[in-house]
Image: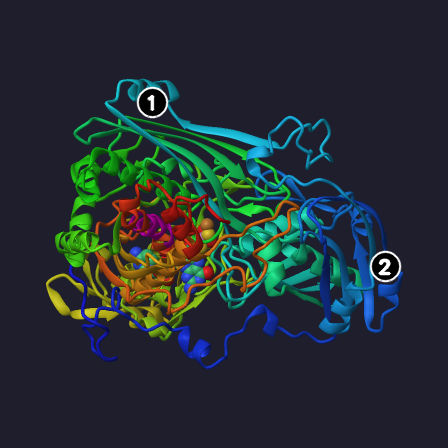
Amino acid sequence: TIIEEHPANPAAGDADRPIGYGRLQRKEDPRFVRGKGNYVDDIVLPGMLHGAILRAPVAHARLVSIDTSKALAHPGVKAVITGQDLLGLKLAWAPTLSADVQAVLVTDKVRFQGQEVAFVVADDRYSARDALELIEVDYDVLPPVVDVRKALDPGAPVIRDEIEGRTDNHIFDWEAGDKAECDAVFASADVVVSQEMVYPRVHPAPMETCGAVADYEPIDGTLTLYETSQAPHAHRTLFAIVAGIPEHKIRIVSPDIGGGFGNKVGIYPGYILAVVGSIVTGKPVKWMEDRSENLMSTSFARDYIMQGEIAATKDGKILALRTNVLADHGAFNATAQPTKYPAGFFHIFTGSYDLQAAHCKVTGVYTNKAPGGVAYACSFRVTEAVYLVERMVDILARKLEMDPAELRLKNLIKPEQFPYKNKTGWEYDSGDYATALRKSMDMAGYDELRREQKEKRARGELMGIGISFFTETVGAGPRKHMDIVGLGMNDGAELRVHPTGKAVVRISVQSQGQGHETTFAQIVAEELGIPPEDIDVVHGDTDQTPFGLGTYGSRSTPVSGAAVALVARKVREKAKFIAAAMLETRPEDLEWEKGRWFVKGDPSAGKTIAEISMGAHGTVALPEGIDGNLDAEVTYDPPNLTFPFGAYICVVDVDPGTGHVKVRRFIAVDDCGTRINPMIIEGQVHGGLTDGVGMALMQFIEFDAEGNNLGGTFMDYLIPTALEVPNWETGFTVTPSPHHPIGAKGIGESATVGSPPAIVNAVVDALAPFGIQHMDMPCTPARVWAAMQGRPRPP
Ligand code: MCN
Ligand code: CUM
């Protein structure tokens, strides 16, 4: 099922051009490249005040006293809000997305460095920031819990002692798969290998930090909140519940978003404080984080310690996989994932292989660190899952002295096994895995690379080749299986075709750079034959769009994309009845071709969508039950998630003198089913691969023994640039999703999920002469060098 791609976008006006799948340039780019984007910080309202947050300098401390009088006296300061003030408003604690609560401002105890302690509202940003230094706080510093491995020790300080009866830092235990069956397979296997691996704490670090402008109107009780949000409708419902403002009085606007990457899914104290500030002062209040605030206090990602074990026969048939995971959730359990899955979709850790058994257990614990955990293009923790299985398969290949490509080819799920039910309950919709892996090997010249490596090894040069094969599960989700804080994960779409045939489609997801204004117009164009430039996509304003759960987990195409295709089909069906009236024939005598209904056997007698729309809005006598417009709306409940996949090959050179790793080549073959816009897909893949280089080689948020965050600036937390990445070599196969209306699967996180194991596999492969079985990310020069010397791992 490999479909050849249509050629590049032909000139405008060409009637035959492939509007559905062409490499249409992004409709949003003219405003972005001219500096005309409209971000939250660009919003200026009359009389607007500015907020700033005082943050805790230590990780764990009792709040003894707080004196705000000097700050209040500072020129320009309009209000100083403390945790005590919020207690009075019943807003000191807010519910998280994981059935926990999080302090909006500290009332009793600081629980991580950078936590919110007080909020100053002033005439301008500088006065607000200056006033922060005038707030006098007395802390009684407590020993922090920094090492997740010690968080459950009997004597460990109890972080969440405000919860009655709590005597430890344990949050949850969660399991998937059949443990007994799995243990039995392990017991009788020829070969078992195990490895502990750390997927370190990293941060999505979008270019735009988080912020909000809150405008509470006391006269009619309406709240307009401009927010950096990936999920405006879900936020509106939560604000209604948290702040007690009726939902119909709340309008949430997410204007242009300068990158989200999961960082903008949750509701942060700053958003709530902007609202409180506006209520208290009666003026609009803007709050915008700086870079360190973003890195230190907003949703981090990963932080999983995984104990992996894989069982196989001696000739390389993989039988089973099991893992125990220790998950560091920080001081509040604020991870964002469907309610039933405290470890997200980690239980897809069986990967792309046909196994006899699998079992995973995840233990979540509190530590004195910022909350979060599900972010950074993670597909709800599929990142961690894919890293685990792909590292384990490589370690097994080494043990069996088999080529890692050969071992994978032997064990991949076969095309005829789809739909494939894995051992932890997922039903993979479609796949042709071996074809994708072979294609990546052809593109890489795999055999030639292995020959080159052999020659280089003989000369003492360190070259490594790493493979990863991943399967994702994206498109949350079917309401029978999942919800977030009780909200079903369905999306709406509303389509209006104006009398002259121009259209507007309103969607419930929110673009943060993914190009939705282009690709969703392309879906309508494909279904109705209207050129994409004649279709406007409206998103990011709860007053203007249908309810839906927002953009994350690469769900926009699988869920909202399906809604858009279906709403266009609904309009097409309605158009048939109107066309029949216009052509004085019966609807069943009409046939559809791109853009028009015509009489079967008489192609000259037909009406285009534009003509039909004019007819609908005009004076054509309409059939019974058809009203005078060409509009429709739908709410889509996906029957299943979609399962994109890919085969990645990474080639690295390691400098034996310095331990520096250079990614020399990277080949990525992705399959996201039907491809709506290949150029946008490539952009998503390039971005995700760059993330992968960041995580595998450069990035981690470390803490010292006192719980000080050592990754709070871009001097310490490194962002890969064009200098660190190769020219990406991308390829694709197309295996449509059988249940998605246009066969599309998500792509937005695939490369971030799939690339880190390929890079680490390549580094470990390069270091094979040293007998190294595993290296934890990031493979920094210091760590690689130490590994080569047989020294302990430096931080
Ligand atoms: N697409 C396509 N054909 C497909 C699948 C997708 O043309 N078969 C297009 C879509 O129409 C959309 C884009 O590719 O324009 C990404 O689609 P999708 O995979 O549905 O993902 P989402 O739109 O839901 O985006 C979310 C995803 C996530 S969860 C993170 S995290 C991430 C990512 O997108 N954050 C991003 N990519 C990002 N890219 C940018 N520029 N900024 C972010 O914050
Ligand atoms: Cu997990 S990051 Mo994206 O789902 O927004």
Q: Secondary structure at mark 2?
A: loop
* Residue 661 visible (yes or no): yes
Q: Secondary structure at mark 1?
A: helix
Give x and y (percent) for residue 259: 48, 63
Q: Is residue 218 depicted above or below 501 in this figure? A: above
Outermost left residue:
601
Foreground of the two, 163 or 40: 163
Nearer the N terminus, badge 1 or badge 2?
2
- Determine if the magenta segment contains residue 716: no
Give x and y (percent) for residue 394: 28, 40
Ligand 1's image quarter is bottom left
Magenta residues span 752-762
In the drawing, does residue 336 fall left or right of residue 675?
right
Foreground of the two, 112 or 14: 112
Residue 23 location, quadrant:
bottom left
The residue carrying mark 1 is 182
| Amino acid on which the number 1 mark rests in the picture | Cys
Give x and y (percent) for residue 12: 25, 79
Outermost bottom residue:
34
| Scheme of colours in the image | rainbow
Tell me what residue is drawn at x 59 percent, y 61 percent.
Answer: 210
* Residue 560 visible (yes or no): no
The residue carrying mark 2 is 68
Q: CA distance from mark 1 to mark 2?
A: 59 Å
Q: Main secondary structure of the magenta part?
A: helix
Q: Categorize mark 1 by other alpha carbons within 10 Å: few (<14), some (14-19), many (20+).
A: many
| Amino acid on which the number 2 mark rests in the picture | Thr
Q: Is residue 266 depicted above or below 604 in this figure? A: above
